[in-house]
Image (cartoon, rainbow, N blue to C red):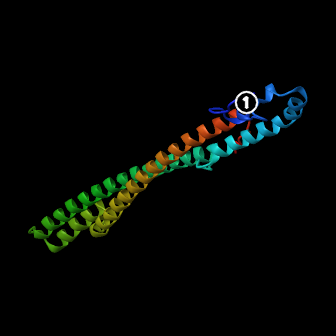
Amino acid sequence: MSTSNIGETGIKSIRLGGMKVEDLPIRESALTAVQLPLVEDAERQTKIEGILHGKPKQRVSYLKSRIVECEENIKRISKMKEKTQEDIQQYIGHISLCKFRDKEIEKVQQSSDSRTRKRKRINNLNKQFPPYNVEMMQQQITQWEEAIQRADEVIAQEYKSISEFREVLTVCVDRDAQLKKLGVQVVAG
């Protein structure tokens, strides 16, 4: 009597002489039973290979550490941006004071005071307001603004990397869960 194996997979699909393993005579059934663990293991290995095929190779812990690294970079660069913006504001304040000083010096120079009196008043103004080089400060502000722009680009790239890592992480977590169901010990490190 022949039994069809259409629609059956794995061990259930095995037919010997057209018979299911459990329908075989005792002697043949016993000989076959010894070999079934090998077939089961081969089937398990095939499933494992199927899960691993086409899946990312990274470990979950590695991906999580890369995400943390990107987040730390974002924090660090954001702090640098804040500090740079504070420096820009400070320089803008100094430039304003220098412009005020220069206007006052111009007023003194146009005044009818004696040369000695003018010099004394100009010296007092220079003592009150540090003699910063406004042109150099403006160049520094421009460089800082360019650095902020580059920092924004780096932050955007880090967010993109985080998104990509999270996508791969989701696949790897699923992969590892499937492997654990098959008895595979997934390395955490």
Closer to us: 82 or 39: 39
Can residue 99 be seen by looking at this rendering? Answer: yes
Image quarter of residue 132: bottom left
Residue 34, x across and y down, in percent: 87, 34
Closer to us: 174 or 35: 35
Q: Quadrant of the N terminus?
A: top right
Q: Is residue 45 left or right of residue 174?
A: right
Q: Residues within 10 Å of mark 1 (few under 14, many from 20)?
A: few
Q: Is residue 10 left or right of residue 27?
A: left
Residue sitting at x 78%, y 39%: 39
Look at mark 1 in the image and give the residue it sits on: 2
Extreme residue toward the bottom, this view: 115
Image quarter of residue 87: bottom left
Residue sitting at x 89%, y 26%: 26
SS for callout 1: loop
Residue 73, x across and y down, in percent: 50, 51
Count of residue discs: 1
Residue 65, x across and y down, in percent: 59, 46
Extreme residue toward the front, this view: 1
Residue 22, x across and y down, in percent: 80, 26
Residue sitting at x 58%, y 43%: 64
Circle 1: residue type: Ser
Q: Is residue 154 left or right of residue 146?
A: right
Decide: is 64 above or below 25: below
Decide: is 135 above or below 40: below
